[in-house]
Image (cartoon, rainbow, N blue to C red):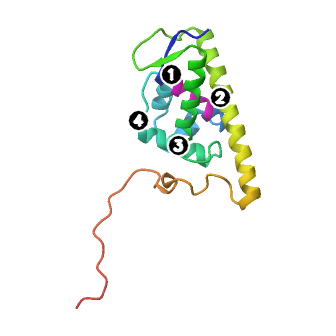
């Protein structure tokens, strides 16, 4: 059974772990393609560390590339649905230290809730994608986000631009 309060990083971490598992990837394989240390992802998934926005964008981008999600912003949509589901069950989320979910029953219950919310979301997304392909011939969410075009990997500084040969 869940306690009356759960830490938000744990809820987000369990959500990210389930999404990674939907892609059928180990932490090591998932991290190697994004350039995030496996230890960092392990801490995030366990709820022991907060995820930075940049890390969430990388994770979400990789999930899009793997076909689990269709566009950026869906991790936050899923988190919102999950928080609403927890609230309906009488559990609130906090940012401070609360009763630990170290017992297996609490974590297993949270994982069941996360799984139900994610499965419902992915089923709806699949139906929407099928409908959009039928209507317009293009999968829903494609080209729908400016984040999709962001460069991946480390940012490198380029040298000065070369002048064109048109000097006056």
The mark nearer the N terminus, 3 or 4, is: 4
The mark nearer the N terminus, 4 or 1, is: 1
Give the extent of the magenta segment.
10-19
Q: In the rendering, which numbered label is found on residue 73?
A: 3
Q: Secondary structure at mark 3?
A: loop
**Residue 135: % across, % down:** 74, 58
Q: Is residue 16 visible?
A: no
- The answer to whether the residues at label 2 and label 3 have Cβ atoms under 8 Å apart is no
The mark nearer the N terminus, 2 or 3, is: 3
The mark nearer the N terminus, 4 or 2, is: 4
Q: Total number of numbered labels?
A: 4
Magenta stretch: dominant secondary structure: helix
Query: What residue is disc 1 on?
Result: 10
For marks 3 and 4, give the CA distance: 14 Å
Viewer-side residue, 28 vs 21:
21
- The answer to whether the residues at label 4 and label 1 have Cβ atoms under 8 Å apart is no
Residue at 59% from the left image edge and 46% from the top image edge: 64
For marks 2 and 1, give the CA distance: 16 Å
Query: What residue is disc 2 on?
Result: 117
Q: Above or below — where is 65 with respect to 3?
A: below
**Residue 148: % across, % down:** 52, 53
User: For mark 3, does the 10 Å Cα neighbourhood hold few (<14), some (14 to 19), or many (20 or more) residues?
Assistant: some
- The answer to whether the residues at label 1 and label 3 have Cβ atoms under 8 Å apart is no
For marks 1 and 3, give the CA distance: 19 Å
Q: Above or below — where is 82 with respect to 67?
A: above
Residue at 60% from the left image edge and 18% from the top image edge: 88
Q: Above or below — where is 167 with respect to 9?
A: below
Query: What residue is disc 4 on?
Result: 52
């Amino acid at each position: 059974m869940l306690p009356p309060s759960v830490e938000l990083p744990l809820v987000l971490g369990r959500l990210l772990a389930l999404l990674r598992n939907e892609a059928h990837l180990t932490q090591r394989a998932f991290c190697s393609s994004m350039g995030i240390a496996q230890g960092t992802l392990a801490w995030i998934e366990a709820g022991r560390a907060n995820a930075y926005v940049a890390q969430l964008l990388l994770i979400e981008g990789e999930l899009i590339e793997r076909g689990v999600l269709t566009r950026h912003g869906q991790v936050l949509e899923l988190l919102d649905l999950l928080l609403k589901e927890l609230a309906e069950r009488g559990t609130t989320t906090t940012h401070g230290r609360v009763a630990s979910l170290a017992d297996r029953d609490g974590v297993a219950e949270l994982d069941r809730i996360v799984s139900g919310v994610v499965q419902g979301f992915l089923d709806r997304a699949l139906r929407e994608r099928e409908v959009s392909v039928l209507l317009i011939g293009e999968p829903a969410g494609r080209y729908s986000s400016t984040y999709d075009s962001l460069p991946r990997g480390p940012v490198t500084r380029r040298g000065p631009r070369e002048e064109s040969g048109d000097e006056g």
